[in-house]
Amino acid sequence: MACLDRRDLGLLLLRVGTGAVLAAHGSQKLFGWFGGGGIEGTTAGMQAMGFHPPGRSAVVAGLGEAGSGALLALGLATPVAGAAAAGIMSAAVAVHAPAGFFAQGGGYEYPAFLGFTAAAIGLTGPGRYSLDHATHHLLNRPRIVALAFAGSAAGVVVVVGKRSRGLRKNAAEN
């Protein structure tokens, strides 16, 4: 009988824990579960934070968090899941950045931690106890890692840039 590999077990725990947190946050946004606002409340929040169009932004944020979280927990398409979660958390960091670093003051500490953790998992890989391993890493190849992180970075630049331009325009009008 093969002995459990501590690294693979550690990656499993890290993936499942991080994925569950992300999936729960996405479920708040999409379905109103766990005290969340659902799509309507999230749409209102997105509008208040300067994301346009707010409804589409709410759906993308919810699906991105729930989907990337589920994929991370399962260890399936791990580079894509890690990159997507890191990208979505980058947008959250941009929202919280004016409040400083620490979460108790409304800062970006928490989304930054989730984003860095998801990115690290996406880069490191899911470990042996994963669906990627069971599928012979079909969706966990070096080119997929590069494409996923490049695509996520490009998406963040577009979304955060559009939000920033909108905020500057609104500030200039007021």
Image: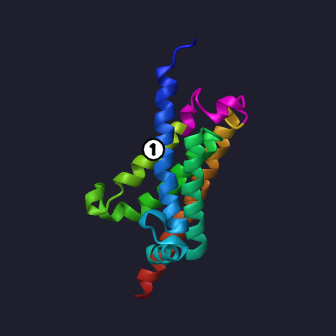
Q: Using the image as rendered, state which of residue 30 and residue 50 is in the foreground.
A: 30
In the image, what residue occupies the spot 60% across and 64% down? 60
Residue extending farthest top: 1
Extreme residue toward the left, this view: 104
Question: Percent from the top left, x then y, of residue 109?
Answer: 34, 52
Q: Is residue 148 left or right of residue 19?
A: right
Q: Quadrant of the C terminus?
A: bottom left
Residue drawn at point x = 60 percent, y = 45 percent: 71
Q: Is residue 92 above or below residue 139?
A: below
Which x, y percent locates residue 52?
56, 75
Which is more toward the observer, 49 or 174?
Answer: 49
The residue that appears at 54% across and 32% down in the rendered structure is 124
The residue drawn where x is 58% and y is 33% is 125
Q: In the rendered structure, does residue 22 fall within the stretch colored magenta?
A: no
Tag 1 secondary structure: helix
Amino acid tagged 1 = Phe
Magenta span includes 137: yes
Q: Which residues are magenta?
A: 122-138
Left or right of 164 in this view: 77: right
Residue that badge 1 annotates: 116
Residue 133, horizontal then vertical, whole percent: 66, 29
The N terminus lies in quadrant: top right
Whole-percent x, y for residue 91 in the image: 49, 60
Q: Quadrant of residue 107?
A: bottom left
